[in-house]
Amino acid sequence: MAALQLEKQRGRYAALAIAAVVIVVGVPLWWKTTETYRAWLPFSEISELDTLQLQLSVDVEVVFSRGTLTPEQQKKVPLSHVNEKEHNIDAKTGLRYKYETRYRTATVMEEDALNQQTAAEADLSLHMLSESSCGSVVVYVIPESSTLLPEDVKVYVGQRRTALLRSPPFKSSWSLKEVLSSLDVKVEQVVSTMSFSHQDVVAALSDRVRLTKVTKESMADSMRAIKSSPGYEITFSLLNPDPKSHSLHWDIEGAVQSYIQPLLNKLAPIANFSVDSQILYYAVLGVNPRFDNSVSAYTLSADSLSHVINPVEARLGSNAASSNPVLNFLLYVPDAHHSPLFIKDHSKREVPSNAFHSPRWGGIMVYNVNEMYGPEAKRPVDININMAKVMGVFLAQLRLMLGVQHSNPPPGFVLQSPGSTGLADWELDRLLWSRSVENIATASTTITSLAQLLDQIGNIVINDNIAQQVSSAVTSLQYAVAELEAGNLAFALQYSREAILASEKAFFDPSLLHLLYFPDDQKFAIYIPLFLPMCVPIVLSLLKIVSEAKQRRAAKQAKKD
């Protein structure tokens, strides 16, 4: 009897020991070895980015030349004036524009520069005296009687960041406050033309703002331009569908250096560019042009242009070594049986450039050569392509693709041609404003979406590399917003580029694929067959021990009674 009791006691101790080992050692060890590693993320700072309040600060300098103010008014000119405007786009997005205007009179050297024969010469002379900072605007107020501008021109915007403003007619009885108030309207129009407009900024926020908040013109410009990217691939292709009739020669290398490279050099702060070219033989448009008897030529209607790109794109190939967006510019020389070939718009009128563009893809130009040789010419005919004519069209299309928006100045404004660089300094500033705001909006949306994804999927792994990229993106976003507020446009663009690169690198990390992680019900289906056979004997033994303990306690209580 004693041996039996000893054996039962040994069995109870063994069951308790096994249960203790499982609970104290096994369960914590299993929990630790199967837990999901989640590096720390700045969720509080990310939640603040969900509500985006941007302030864009512009430095404006108004310079009064001789004859625009009386001596008494010159003494009372204020040093500076700050004007702020606020716009609440939606519940989570707000904009504030801060214009800090400084007033002064022109120096002797600036007066000499303003005495040039033409406005273009004056603009160049003023630029040689001092170079304005990126994002700033300088307005020179010249007398109403000045011959520097034609009589019907009120404002001249040069190639740099300088504008010439003809002084509006002032009454001699006006105070300085009234004079400045009448000037503020024109100065505001100049600043809106040379820096940014409200609609341009709202269009740049298209990732966060509903389309109803944006005008059709601004949205069309935004949709036409290719999305912001750290780099772009530009490909020029010559399509020769009839090499038996035409032997085409184009100096694409020299043309790129003369017409395209100056523009790309000026756009270097925005992105990196690589340019290549190719010649495709027997490449056709894929659309049969129709012969128009009224003009004795073949035509492509505006409705058929949408069917041109896909067949041609299949022949272009792709650059598998780069993930950057590609802009395609195609020069198509029609075959002898379909020449001449003209493009017609929706009004059935011939397009002067004989070219068209597709938003965020590129452009195609039709180059007719039938007038360059007679019917008795020996085939194939050697033809040298006029690259100045071709590059003029491609340069205009490239500006549109990269987001250089065509500004519609108010009446009385004259905008000087950008010249050989293909881009004026103030046009570059407009692009920098839009790109900075677009990068901030895109990066903030990407980071907040990533934070919501990681919050919803609790067992997703967050490794140190992802945490580093997220923290870097958040820090760069904060810096970009601060630099915009301070008016440092170049630094704002740099930080916004870093933010969008880090945010997209974290969001598209392969370890964050949702399919790599199982839902909880599937985990239970895996763990139950493993742990149930082991747990049943332990649980039954513990229940038996508890039952025997209750019986012994009841027996002892009965003996006492």
Image: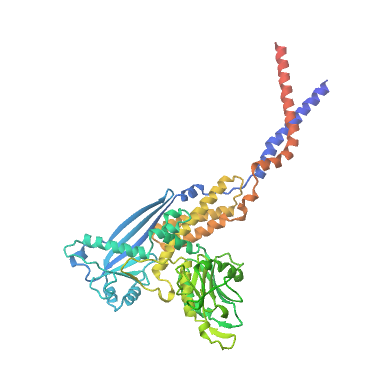
| Horizontal and vertical percent position of residue 289 | 55, 73
Number of disc labels:
0
10 vs 429: above or below: above
Q: Identify the image quadrant of residue 410.
A: bottom left
Q: Residue furthest top?
A: 561
| Horizontal and vertical percent position of residue 440 | 47, 57
Q: Identify the image quadrant of residue 202.
A: bottom left
Q: Nearer the viewer, residue 338 or 315?
A: 338
Q: Residue furthest front?
A: 293
Quadrant position of the C terminus in the picture:
top right
Q: How is the image coloured?
A: rainbow
Q: Residue at x 52, y 53 (%)?
A: 447
**Residue 409 visible here:** yes
Q: Nearer the viewer, residue 464 or 246?
A: 246
**Viewed as shown, does residue 128 lie left or right of 434?**
left
Quadrant position of the N terminus in the picture:
top right
**Viewed as shown, does residue 76 lie left or right of 388?**
left
**Viewed as shown, does residue 415 lie left or right of 353?**
left
118 vs 75: above or below: below
**Residue 265 visible here:** no
Q: Residue at x 51, y 84 (%)?
A: 371
| Horizontal and vertical percent position of residue 520 | 64, 42
Q: Nearer the viewer, residue 89 or 287?
A: 287
430 vs 213: above or below: below
| Horizontal and vertical percent position of residue 89 | 41, 52
Q: Residue at x 51, y 77 (%)?
A: 297
Q: Identify the image quadrant of residue 413.
A: bottom left
Q: Residue at x 52, y 54 (%)?
A: 446
